[in-house]
Image: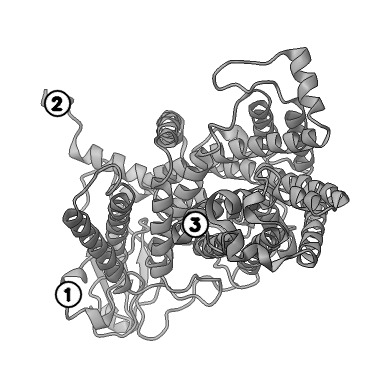
Amino acid sequence: MARWLPRSTDVARFFQKLNRVKTLEDDMMETSFNRCLSTIDLTLLGIGGMVGSGLYVLTGTVAKEIAGPAVILSFIIAGFASLLAALCYAEFGARVPKTGSAYMFTYVSVGEIWAFLIGWNVLLEYMIGGAAVARAWSGYLDSIFNHKIKNFTEAHMGAWQVPFLARYPDFLAAAILLVATAFISFGAKVSSWLNHVFSTISMGVILFILVMGFILAQPKNWSAQEGGFAPYGLSGVMAGTATCFYAFVGFDVIAASSEEARNPQRAVPRAIAFSLGLATGAYILVSVVLTLMVPWHSLDPDSALADAFYRRGYTWAGFLVAAGSICAMNTVLLSNLFSLPRIVYAMAEDGLFFQVFSRVHPRTQVPVVGIVVFGLLMALLALVFDLEALVQFLSIGTLLAYTFVAASVIVLRFQQQKVVGPALVAGGQPSAEPHESPAAGELKEYESFSDKLQLVDRDKSKEHREPGQLKAAFEPYMEFLSDFYPGEVVTVAVVTLMVSAICLCSVLVFGNTHLHLPTWSYSLLLVLFSLGFFLSLLLIWAHEQQHSTQTFQIPLVPLSPALSIVLNIYLMLKLSYMTWLRFAIWLLLGLLVYFGYGIRHSKENLREPRVQRLSARYVVFPSGSLEERVQAVQPSAEPATHTELPDTHTEEDGKR
């Protein structure tokens, strides 16, 4: 029976395949896409992804049902929380200017299977999100015409009473998605121009709302007679924050477009900062004028802004608000249709998804197969399916992506550079001297095939330390950690940090409600898991990290990404169990695709035979002395490969 069991070496090799990372070898500015997008183009794409129907609907809903006028505070806190995730995307978008967004960021730092699952979830997130916005667009336009489109369709097609299907086929929603798909297929420049038009109209309407709103403002609507500024207290503000957080989902379209940016090192961080700042300002100011125009408790949750102008006697202004809402929803549709095919392209280009989606049209320079196929799927979803039950799925996919990107920032920041080939410098051009001679006091390495570097006979007295190594100040107290590979301890600490964050948030969310823990055990668990979280954070901080002046880097690492991880996990655990059940089913389908296709066709498979033949490592010290250490490898049928060294040894070495 033992012969049927897999050998330990086979099991180890299998897990290595699951966790292999993407190797960035070539010039990262080289691409089959058209690098034509400027900072303004990316900023407007980000604004279009964030300032959608939420500005016209979400503000009124949260103000009336959750937070009252204190919805302003909810948007401020939610904007800050989104900033933590956005800064992580900004660092990766500038450092790895390749399409794929969260999928690509996870692949280059955490591992292949995790990257695939992130991409798989983002894929469904964009499809459901685009279809849901299309149905909202259709319903909003239909309401302007007193639901004549809906009544006509039900009269001729009948009302459906089938689970998971809509009450009637929404031909208008499907049609707008097909039209948007056609425009996206014409290329990034056409998509950007169309987004400019709709974003300009939307921002003009928002400016009109703010000017008219402050003119019609009545401070008494915040008085105690109307319930006060925060009628639901601090709990209402925090509950509103959880809802408002999803209003800022959409800035990742900028990271997904980084391969089409002219100068991604500068454009991506600036566009993310500008778009998030403008979107946060718009949400806050619109919330101010909305709750000052009419009492918060009398708002119409479905169309709060338009109804506020109607009630103040400005009927014509309501039509302007409706036009702005439709334009805002158009920008969200374009954002979804723009990002989704590029993420699918990145997965197909790496061999993890079907190869047909990696084809780029030679003239328009966009992944036209992915655009058409997923545009049609999105139109089908909008046409026949009931999307209300699936909309919550958007939240869990987004939050999971945010969590892994934040963890990836920590892992990659404490690793040595793995990019082979011309290095990127500011301005997006490859360096003319990719292989510079080592500075004084540094070690120069030559390694045959492995990308995991190990220094031989390190001189621990040197002040210069590589990323991932223990800081000199902590070495007397943690000397037992200095024997690990650079970055190895940090990776384990990140896993421990995430496990501690999950346990901590589980106690906070379920401790008093579902688990009914006694006060002493509730407090004890909070202390233990908080201690594990902060000790992991301290252990990460005790190691050296990369410091680059060429691209943007998020400040206060590892604290900033760690806070983002905790917040995202907390919000995920607040979702309903049905959302988690659907999420688990979708993950199982993704695992079938990965193990049935992706793991065998991954392009990283081509690199593995080279890794197996590694036999020696050489390190040339600044003094010119040469040392060799032969690494023990498994017996192989192939002869060991000797590594050629540049002629850098001195006469003294020759005598030796």
Query: Residue 243 or 340: which is nearer the viewer?
Result: 243
Query: Residue 123 or 8: which is nearer the viewer?
Result: 123
Q: Residue 79: in sight, yes or no?
A: yes
Disc 3 target residue: 232
Q: Residue at x 41, y 46 (%)?
A: 574
Q: Name which residue type carries label 1.
A: Glu
* Residue 120 position within the rendered picture, expressed as x and y whole percent measured from the top left: 50, 38
Q: Secondary structure at mark 2?
A: helix
Residue 171 in the figure: left or right of residue 451: right
Disc 2 target residue: 3
Task: Give residue 479's mark.
Answer: 1
Q: Residue at x 50, y 62 (%)?
A: 81
Badge 3: how crowded within 10 Å, few (<14), some, or many (20+)?
Answer: some
- Tag in front: 3 or 2: 3
Q: Name which residue type carries label 2.
A: Arg
Residue 496 in the figure: left or right of residue 100: left
> Image quadrant of residue 265?
bottom right
Q: Earlier in the sequence, mark 1 or mark 2?
A: 2
The answer for how far apart the CA atoms under marks 1 and 2 are is 43 Å
Badge 2: how crowded within 10 Å, few (<14), some, or many (20+)?
Answer: few
* Residue 580 position within the rendered picture, expressed as x and y whole percent measured from the top left: 41, 36
- Tag in front: 1 or 2: 1
